[in-house]
Image (tube, rainbow, N blue to C red):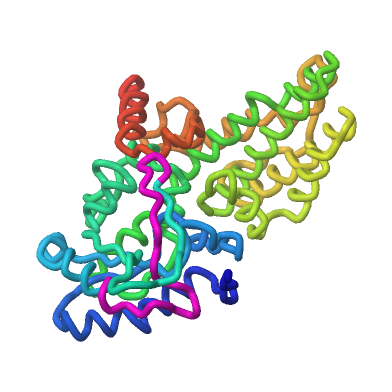
Amino acid sequence: MITPDPPFVPGLELAAALYEDAVRPLLESAYPQLCYAAARIGPGSEVLGFDTARSTDHDWGPRLQLFLTPEDAEQHGAAITALLAERLPRQIRGWSTRYRRTGDPHNPVSHLEPAAGATVDHRVTVHHLPGWLTTRLGPRAAAWIDTDPATTDWLALPQQRLAELTAGTVLRDDHGTLTAVRRRLHWYPDQLWRHLMACQWQRIVQEEAFVGRCAETGDELGAAIVAARLARDLMRLALLQRRTYAPYSKWLGRAFARLPADPALGPALRAALAATDHDTRERHLCDAYESAARTHHALALTEPIDPTCRLYHSRPYQVLHADRFVHALRRTVTDPDLRDLPPTGSVDQWADNTDLLGRPAAVHAAVDALVGQVH
């Protein structure tokens, strides 16, 4: 007989219940003097608030991270993991606390299964914060507990990883170090923010005329693909403009839908993507460009720029000429570490390969090499 799943509970709510109802009392009893942080951050749809009942089929459930000092993690980490395996309740809010792992190193997912036997294979993981940051964000990340990242460090941080760190929930933070690093990385420094917006506009510059050229040659499929790329870039620009880290592709639309953006932008993008002829596609793309331009004007970061579309030089395509926004923003960047950089931006403005972005050391090395070529 298959037991039906209990009612869905958002993962962050489940994490809070796991901590308050089970983990905190056990730690207070066994380690009354222990100082630590408890949080649900890092990977997982629930961290960004995007989980649904569908999420429960893998890598979801009652789970937490505990952050100890490096010394306490070495001395007590294994014992705490064993204590929780022996004494955690078998369920929280009706959901099992036991996980079954695939055992495949190339597919290391886990699934909830009914808790049975003497111990629970749980997902309350014990870390020390410097090590966790290094694993998730790169080889220099431990220093950001006390100091701000350098420009090259910021450029090597995928927005998905920044979102995973700064979203979620912190349930306890005795030393305040987790809270401090989350605050330090909650958004880009102002000068870097301007630079990244200029780089995002630059992506639009590079392809805004291609929709018309593809259509002119009879390549409707190519025109639609370029339009979709531009729609993605406009969505990511909108997130930058609203100081919101962009998640990876699965959640980009959900994050965009939450924005207090210009109400014309979303409908214009949907209409452009649904269009089956060039005139309709171009008209709606121009509506989207002009919406993004109006939002830029509202930020008051540069001199006013005419937000209307116009012909692409002598060719009969309507475009924004987004280079005007690139140049205007770059004129406001006075930081010498940014002023001479090419308009490539942060790593996920020029790379979207998941296997690369998931390797922090490789990403930092690539960005260091790119910046080193300039300086």
Whether residue 90 is visible here, answered yes or no, is: yes
- The residue positioned 78% from the left and 45% from the top of the image is 270
Residue 15 location, quadrant: bottom left
Q: Residue at x 80, y 38 (%)?
A: 272
Give yes or no for residue 260 being in the magenta stretch: no
Q: Camera-side residue: 171 or 87?
A: 87
x%, y% of residue 205? Answer: 64, 27
Measured along the vertical axis of the image, is residue 219 above or below residue 278?
above
In the displayed orientation, state which residue is furthest to the front: 1
Q: Position of residue 332 (x, y in %)?
A: 49, 39
**Which quarter of the picture shows residue 366?**
top left
Q: Position of residue 28 (x, y in %)?
A: 22, 84
Decide: is 190 above or below 33: above
The quarter of the image holding the N terminus is bottom right
**In the displayed structure, would residue 119 be above or below residue 360?**
below
Which residue is depicted at the point 58% across and 69% down? 2
- Magenta stretch holds residue 106: yes
Instruction: Locate the C terminus and report the quarter of the image it occupies.
Output: top left
Q: Which residues are magenta?
A: 85-107
